[in-house]
Image (cartoon, grey):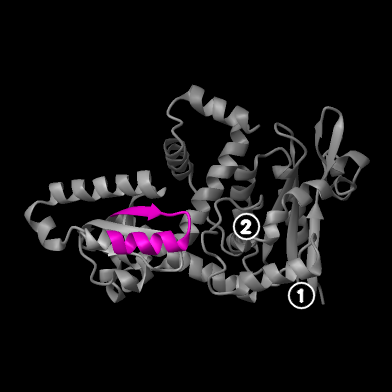
Amino acid sequence: MPLFPDHLLNDALAFLCRVSDAEPADARRLLGDLRAGHPDVPMRLVWQRDHPGGSHHYDLLITAPDGTVSVAFAPARAVPWPLRGSHGAGEQVVVRVDGADVRMEQAMAVLDGLWGDSSLAARLVNAALVEQELERDPVELSAEELQEAMDAFRRARGLLTVRATRDWMAERGLDHASLETIVHQEAAIARLRRRVAADGAAERFAADQDGHDRLSVLRLRYPHLEAARTAAVRLRDRGTRAETFAQAAEEARAEIFAQAAAEAFEYGADVRPALVYRRELGPEAAGTCAGDVLGGGPEPLVTCVLEVRPAVLDDETRRAIENRIFDDWLARRRAEASVEWMWGTALRTGSVTRALRAPDGSRGASPTSPADGG
C-alpha cells in the first residue's frame, strides 16, 4: 500500500524547486496551492538561512502513517540540508571578545536564571506550541493585511519614518524580508489569539462585570513587607474617604498624591500610578471606592484608589480578556505537551517542567514571536 497519494512527492519536489529562490512569506503563500491539491495530507514547511541577506533552504515535512517524511531540494551550488546540520569547531562559539571565545556551554551558564524563573522557560515552550498550532491551521495574510500589520508594527515602536525604520533594522541585523517575517509572525499570533478566544470575551465579561471596572491607582512599593503593612494602617488612618471624593475629587486626589510623596520621602516607597482592572487587585478590591487603601497582602505593596470607572466591554477590555483566554489555552497545551530539554540537569529541567504544567505557569509568558516556520 503506497504511503502517499499519487503525485504527492512529485508535486512536493516541484513546489520546492519553485520556492528555492523565494522569500518565506511568498513560500508560505505558494504552500497553500500544494495543500489545496492534497487537503488530507498534513505538511509543514521549514527553512534555514545561513546569514542575513543569504538565500533560504526549504524542507517540506510530510506526515506519514508511522512517522514523517522530509523532502528537500538544493539548487546548484547550494549546500544540501543534511550537510547544513554538520557542526564545525567554530559553530559552538556564541561570541568572541578580544580574541577570547565564549562557547555555548558558557553562554548557558550565564543564562542560569532560566531554571529559576519558569516564565522564561514558558516563553520558549509557548513559542513552540504556537508554531505547531499555526502549522496545523495556518494564517494567511493578503498583501494589504501584511501592509496594515507592518504599519501597526512600526507605529507601536515609534518607527514613523523610513530612516528610523532602517536604523532599527540595522541595529538588529535585519533586512526587509526578515522584517516581513517578524511582522507576519506577530500578525498570525494575533489572529490565532482571536481564533482561540472566539466569543469567549463577552461571556467572561458578563460573568465578572464588576471585576472589569477600571481603577486609577497609586501603587506604593516598600522595601519590606512589615513597612508596607504599617504604611497601609497609617494611610488608612489619615485617608481620604469616598464622601470627600464625591464633594471635591480634585482636591482629594491632590491630598493622596501629597501623602504618597511623603511616603516616598520619609519611608522609601516607590510610588507609581497605574490603571488596572479591579480583578487584578484580588478579592480585597471588591466594592472598593475612590479613597480606599488596599494592603496587607503577601507583597510589600500598598494601593491607593484614585478613581473607579465602571466596566465597559470596549476594544481594550476585549483584548485583555482575549489575552487571558489565550493564556489559559496555552496552559492547557503545556500541561499536555511532551517537553524535552536539551540542556541542563535532570533536577533543574524537571523542576521547570513541573512549573510549566501548573495552571499559573504561563503568567506573563505569552509568546510574541515563534521560531521560523510556516
| Quarter of the N terminus within the rendering | bottom right
Q: Horizontally, is 135 left or right of 350 in the view?
A: left
The magenta-colored residue range is: 217-234
Which residue occupies 36% across, 70% down? 282
Q: Which mark is residue 120?
A: 2
Residue 240 at x, y percent in the picture? 18, 58
Which residue is farthest top? Answer: 163
Q: Residues within 10 Å of mark 1 (few under 14, many from 20)?
A: few
The amino acid beneath tag 2 is: Leu
250 and 321: which is toward the camera: 250
Q: Which residue is mark 1?
A: 65
Nearest the eye: 296 or 374:
296
Inspect the magenta stretch and tell me whether residue 366 lies in it.
no
The x, y position of residue 249, in whole percent, is 13, 51
- At 65% from the left and 60% from the top, the residue drawn is 121
* Residue 77: percent from left, percent from top: 87, 35
Is 34 or 163 nearer to us in this picture? 163
In this view, 336 is above or below 115: below
